[in-house]
Amino acid sequence: MIKKGIILAGGKGTRLSPITKSTNKQLLPIYDKPLFFYPLSNLMLADIRNILIIVNKGQIKNFYNSIGNGSHLGIKIFYKEQVSPNGIPESFKIGKKFIGKSNVALILGDNFFYGQGLIDQLEELKKFKSGCTIYLKDVPKPENYGVVKIKNNKISLITEKPKKFVSSKAITGLYLFDNDVIKLTHKLKPSKRNETEIVDLIKYYQKKRKLNHIKLGRGAIWSDAGKIDDFTNISNFVTSVEKVQGLKIACLDEIAYKKNWIKKDQLIKNINFYGNCPYSDYLRKILKK
């Protein structure tokens, strides 16, 4: 079982420049919520209530202003700075003290997951015991991602941004690791990009035959919001779904309330904090149900 999660919200954000020159891209709005609310909601839906958010140097205050320590949601949020972007696996070095002797889930702060059956697939976090589990999604341009080849329902090949077609199954930004991830991260050597690579970390588990995978089905949506077109598409998607369904995506207060992590009086306090806005109006409707 996984009870601790890390959101990596650092990185250079150069693909979204110049709008990321003044702030982390994960603080930019996807419709009416900061981008990082969406991966945070995924962890909350999986019943993870102890969460470390890793941010760029000097950005802790900005994130804290958005979400605080999480007590108003019945969760605990901690913060650490990533002085310079040295690769995704650095999360486990920065979060070593936070992880302790626990297993851990890592989700990238610019990744968007949504869709039918997703909650059921997040249940794997509750069942997880050891090794490494990665989430896969078929994509139209696998050359832009780390991809895997599957044979006999086992991962036979892992490669980063292949120039020739290997598979359409991309490795998404949600990973489950056992506690060995801390010592294995220290064994990694920087790649040509002068960063440690998540695919190299995953390969360690593959060699030990401790690598598992979950395929996100056709009803599930996954996107990396690293590019402006992807960022805009996600925002437009969330806007459309919320308007058509009348339900909010990544409404952290609603998740906490429905899981009974907070009571009615706390939700009312949250509404007063947000003030007079459509988000508060939605929460008032939740109270009446």
Image: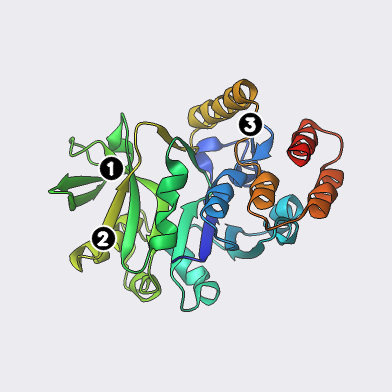
Circle 1/circle 3 CB separation < 8 Å: no
Q: Residues within 10 Å of mark 2 (few under 14, many from 20)?
A: many
Which mark sits nearer the N-terminus, 3 or 2? 2
Establish if 184 lies above or below 219: below
Quadrant of the image occupied by residue 235: top right
Q: Where's residue 284, x and y in %? A: 80, 37
Q: Where's residue 275, x and y in %? A: 86, 40
Looking at the image, is mark 1 or mark 3 nearer the viewer?
Answer: 3
Tell me which amino acid carries mark 3: Leu
The residue shown at (74%, 34%) is 282
Report the residue marked by disc 1: 161
Tell me which amino acid carries mark 2: Leu
**Foreground residue, 60 or 235?**
235
* Local SS, label 3: loop
User: In whole angstroms, how far apart are the C-alphas of marks 1 and 3?
Assistant: 36 Å
Q: Residues within 10 Å of mark 3 (few under 14, many from 20)?
A: few
Looking at the image, is mark 1 or mark 2 nearer the viewer?
Answer: 2
Q: Quadrant of the C terminus?
A: top right
Which mark sits nearer the N-terminus, 1 or 3? 1
Tell me which amino acid carries mark 1: Lys
**Foreground residue, 277 or 207?**
277
**Foreground residue, 280 or 107?**
280
Q: Where's residue 21, x and y in %? A: 63, 42
Report the residue marked by disc 3: 247
Report the residue marked by disc 2: 211
Q: Which mark is residue 186?
A: none
Residue 86 visible in the snapshot: no
Which mark sits nearer the N-terminus, 1 or 2? 1
Establish if 108 lies above or below 239: below
The residue shown at (79%, 49%) is 267
